Image (cartoon, rainbow, N blue to C red):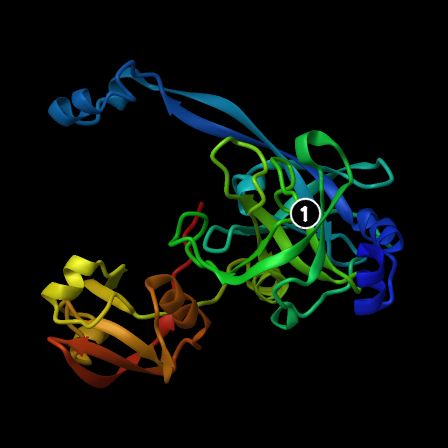
């Protein structure tokens, strides 16, 4: 029945699809140097509350931290896409093991903690590559394969369906969240691996699981390929991701209590919790307590969605936003500027 579904969708048998796809998925090991304070009170919040930060008094010590995960070869000349949390740091020492058992050093081209993505480069040619798929065409209940290295078990393939699209976890996994949700088994070590559709195309980068036990519970998340490709292109070209932002504002979620206090009919929208008095947004008329309910004509349901829209807006453009203020709708134009990348 499953094989028939795959053939019906893309005329590819799942065993043939998996055999082709696993060659493009690598094992990744990353080592980072972490500077930690020697202070015996470093983790004591009561001591810090009364005496402040005394770490300099005790000095620091460097520790080596290691993380393991997966990566996807996205170009024949050696570019690999993975998760930022697998790499850990732009200065990390990273090695990869290919499907044909070659161990190679990888350079970190760029990391992006907004989306939890990172790009690596190895010196190799004629590598097996997964073709890019269009993640915007994914549908709920579509069959997908998750390929990675869970628990260091190389080239593990699991099968499932897309169970939700456009999923946001309110900033728990990344700042910019637009996840594909799947029930294909994803476990520790799968991070950075490939989510593949029935046509053998890369439609997502496996990122995380929802779990209360530490293991697979039927809910996994992947970064859509369209977003991953855009981030990768920017990291390769500029060393950082170019995004739009509105300077001087801080956004938070709207609770039922705040909605009642602000005369809002519901909790939809993004609350402007703080705003700098000398910012362009303030000069445009935006104020703390305003609720942004539309951005360039599209409704805003929550802060995560607003951040996605704003991030995708072109720096130098002017955004048309609709706000709720004391129950009244107001329209205004606010300049969009380039977001400053956070260095790690």
Residue at screen point 38% across, 54% down: 170
Residue at screen point 68% across, 42% down: 70
Percent across and percent down for residue 184 are 66, 48
Residue 299, relative to residue 127: is it above or below?
below
Q: Is residue 276 visible?
A: no
Image quadrant containing the C terminus? top left
Percent across and percent down for residue 66 are 58, 28
Residue 4's image quarter?
Answer: bottom right
Front residue of this view, candidates 287 and 61: 287
Front residue of this view, candidates 216 and 24: 216
Left or right of 291? Residue 216 is right
Left or right of 13? Residue 279 is left
* Secondary-structure class at tag 1: loop
Residue 161, relative to residue 66: is it above or below?
below
Percent across and percent down for residue 200 are 79, 61
Circle 1 crowding by C-alpha within 10 Å: few under 14, some 14–19, many from 20: many
Question: Which residue is the site of mark 1?
Answer: 193
Percent across and percent down for residue 145 are 73, 52
Residue 38's image quarter?
Answer: top left
């Amino acid at each position: 029945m499953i094989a028939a579904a795959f053939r019906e969708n893309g005329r590819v048998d799942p065993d043939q699809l998996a055999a082709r796809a696993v060659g493009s998925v690598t094992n990744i090991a990353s080592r980072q140097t972490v500077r930690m304070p020697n202070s015996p009170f470093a983790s004591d919040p009561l001591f810090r509350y009364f005496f402040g930060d005394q770490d300099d008094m005790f000095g620091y010590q460097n520790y080596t931290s290691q993380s393991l995960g997966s990566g996807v070869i996205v170009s024949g000349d050696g570019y690999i896409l993975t998760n930022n949390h697998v790499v850990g740091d732009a200065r990390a020492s990273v090695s990869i093991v290919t499907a044909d058992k070659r161990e190679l050093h990888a350079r970190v081209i760029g990391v992006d903690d907004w989306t939890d993505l990172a790009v690596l480069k190895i010196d190799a040619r004629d590598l097996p590559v997964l073709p890019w798929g269009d993640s915007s065409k994914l549908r709920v209940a579509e069959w997908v394969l998750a390929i990675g290295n869970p628990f260091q078990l190389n080239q593990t393939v699991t099968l499932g369906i897309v169970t939700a699209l456009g999923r946001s976890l309110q900033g728990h996994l990344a700042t910019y969240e637009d996840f594909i949700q799947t029930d294909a088994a994803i476990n520790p070590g799968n991070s950075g691996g490939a989510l593949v559709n029935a046509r053998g195309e890369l439609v997502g980068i496996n990122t995380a699981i929802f779990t209360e036990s530490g293991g697979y519970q039927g809910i996994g998340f992947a970064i859509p390929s369209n977003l991953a490709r855009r981030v990768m292109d920017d990291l390769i070209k500029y060393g950082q991701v170019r995004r739009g932002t509105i300077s001087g504002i801080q956004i938070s979620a709207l609770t039922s209590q705040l909605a009642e206090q602000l005369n809002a009919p519901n909790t939809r929208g993004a609350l402007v919790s703080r705003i700098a008095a000398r910012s362009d947004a303030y000069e445009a008329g935006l104020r703390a307590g305003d609720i942004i309910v539309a951005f360039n004509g599209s409704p805003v349901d929550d802060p995560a969605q607003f951040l996605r829209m704003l991030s995708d807006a072109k720096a130098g453009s002017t955004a048309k936003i609709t706000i709720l203020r004391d129950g009244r709708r107001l329209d205004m134009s606010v300049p969009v500027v380039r977001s400053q990348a956070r260095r790690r």
